[in-house]
Amino acid sequence: MKEEQTKFSVMDDFVQNKLTEWNLSNLITTFEAEDIDEGNICDLQDDTIRELIPKAGPRDHFKAKLNLLREEQNKTNQEHEEAADSAQVLPSTSGTNDKGKRKCDHLGESSNCQPLTTKRPRITTAQSSNQEQYILCLVKDIMTAVHHKIPKDDKLSTFLKDKIDEKIKDLENDKKELVGIFGKTGAGKSSLINAVIGKKNLLPSGSISACTSVMIKVEANMQSENYEVDIEFITKEEWHNEVHTFLGRETVLEVYDEKLSAMYGDEWKNKSSEELMDDKYFEEIKEFISSKTPKNLKCGSAEELSEAYVTFASSGGKYWPLVKYVTVKVPKKDLLQHVTLVDLPGTGDRNKSRDEMWKEVIGSCSTVWIVTDINRAASEKEPWEILERTCSLMGNGGQCQQIHFICTKTDLIDKDEKPAADVCAESKEEVRKRFRNLPKVERHFGHGDYFKVCTVSSTEFLKKNRLEPENEIPKLQKFLQNLNDCHSETKNYVSGALGILSLIQGTRSREPGKKAEVCNELEEKMRRELEKIKRTMEEAHKALEKCLSEGVETSKGTSERVLRPIREHDDKGGFYRILKCAVERNGSYKSQKADIEIDLNNDIASCLTDCIDEGFNKTFPNDGKTGPFYGAINAFSLDTERLKQKYKDVELQLTFLKTEEETIKMEINKCVQKEKKKVYNSVYTTIDEVMKECYKKAAACSGQGMLQRMRDIIETHVLDPKMFERAKDVMLSKLTALKEKSLKTLEETMQKSIEMSIKTAGDSIPDVTHELVFVGKCYNKLNESSDEETSLI
């Protein structure tokens, strides 16, 4: 009875919403009394309608609206049938009833599914999206109905309900693949992004890339037809701290002048930091004043959007110093449904939160594009500096699997001097040759085929003229499509649903069979498998410990190189001001005009990380599949397929255990990928923490001879070997914690799954025979039609 009430309330919501939408809410009580629901409203005959609505006016109005609803249903049902014909998984009446099908068509609130109309998200083509979304919608509805049918009065029921809820939650947490894009001003980043997504005027060329601080994310807007921009600001407190620091110096350096002048013009030169916090300066951005973020702008076209947000993202705009990042959303852009393009500044920012986000985003990129003009591809200094500067954030400190070096503006090649194809081929070879001379990058990425070179002309592509073979924008689009398609949330969800239904049906068996025997086999097999993983991880731990110990010894000598940037400048050019600025900013300073860059903490950390990079990469390769952690976890198996042949009476329970095994291995590997970045970056964070006291003392220096006193304080700390010992201990401690957490999670999850599936019986578990058969067909079809992942060649 409780189940029926739950179903009715969901169906009743649909009718209630429709009647309200049609301005007939006074009929809601009448329809409820006659049990009119979304499953039968379209079947109402004229006689019944006359009885329900005696007055001619409202009755005719209702009939007109009902006819429109019927037309919508017929159209949607036809689309579903076409998709189902392609998928060959049309539900039989044994799997779902007509009401259940209508529920999927109109999406009762319990389904949490996207509408299956022409506005639904597509993955590769309209047909494949139709198929996957249709399957996903049906299976979600089935699992929602099953969830309602399961009682709440025993441990197994609670376990099953939790599993269904977990699958829904995993589905809703759609993690996007990040593609980070670097390039100096004028390299053609904005034009490249516009060309790849097919929107000519989305990012204004020449103005956005000139800004050195603001990150711009470009992703799909799958919820509406609007072009939208979300602008997230730093906090007012952070800006006040920055301004206070700027104005508290003897001389305001160029790095500060740029920001203050953008925000205040020349007014800042005669005001205090408190006066510059007056709300009158921020009247157009109330979200900044109230710390309500982000600011949202909606536009009808790419051109409107571009004009609307330039003031927030361009160095020529007013508010860019306050912006943390900008997210541009392009309506219904299937290519970006599961992918986000990130236009990245070449370096971090002086604002701490922006700098931390910059590092976090780089560390989360699965692919990085380095963009430069083809005429200077191999010789241009900046793109190669970016690559070397960020490789530790992308590699061992990140999860990047591919680097694409993209040579732009092939349309400007002088074809009279040499054919464009020859120029492109020569440029590619020069780039590859230079890349082979970057040992630091190789230490982070190994020797795999992860470096690709492309030649493109965004201008020619956007003109839609005949494309020359050397214009490889279609190849980049294909790469993004493959990256997009590799998200198999539908398959993962359906697989999990199949396992849960298998367990439900399996637990209905009251035959004791050989459950004790199979349980013993499973637990013994698990013990042996965990022991293998443990041994492999411990060997890797010892190997890294050895590298770290050697690194500590080596660092005692190499730390001298860290001091060169602060020793090689005398004070004739006012270097004391630059060093003072660096210590006030925790050891960091960069000036493009003076071509001076100081990053003491990174340099100190590299004394140790350079010694372990190669070994760390072998332990945690960014493919997420091999190595002593990923590889050992992936190799874990309870051998359920063999046990199915031996123990037929628990075959369904073993199917559930197989899906649980695959799910938990995937989750643990994701956790390892996340935590390994923290393990590697712990060297830097430890150095950063240790050096704070040093910088505080150095910043307090003043008067004659302050430059030398600052140097002496820094040298004393840098040359202290205890700092490297501490960094080593912290890394090993985090590595141990990761190893123990992985083993514990795997053991506890699988042990509980074994107990609930083999040892626990359900007293009132529902029959899900038809649901199990249907979801099995869905799963098989998804496996048949899934494309293999391909990479850019």
Image (cartoon, rainbow, N blue to C red):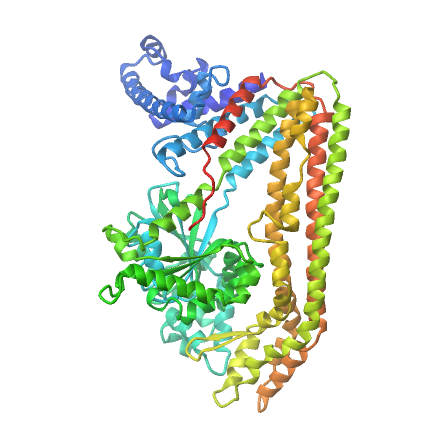
Image x and y of residue 57, in percent = 27, 17
Quarter of the rendering containing residue 750: top right
Residue at horizontal 34%, vertical 10%?
45
Q: Is residue 656 left or right of residue 341?
A: right
Which residue is the extreme one toward the top? 47
Is 374 on the left-hand or right-hand side of 574?
A: left
Residue visible at 62% across and 86% down in the picture: 709
Of 558 and 390, nearer the camera is 558
Quadrant of the image occupied by residue 637: top right
The picture places residue 535, in percent across and down from the top left corner, at 74, 48
Residue 668 in sight from this viewpoint: yes
Q: Residue 726 falls in which quadrant of the image?
A: bottom right
Q: In the drawing, does residue 437 fall left or right of residue 470?
A: right
Q: Nearer the viewer, residue 162 or 84?
A: 84
Q: Is residue 463 above or below residue 62?
A: below
Rendered position, 570 above or below 593: below
Instruction: Give whichever of 277, 789 is nearer the camera.
Output: 789
Number of marks in picture: 0
Q: Position of residue 402 (x, y in %)?
A: 48, 54
Near-viewer residue (792 or 11) = 792
Q: The N terminus appears in which quarter of the rendering?
A: top right
* Residue in view at x 75 percent, y 18 percent: 512
Is there any visible trace of residue 183 in the rendered image?
no
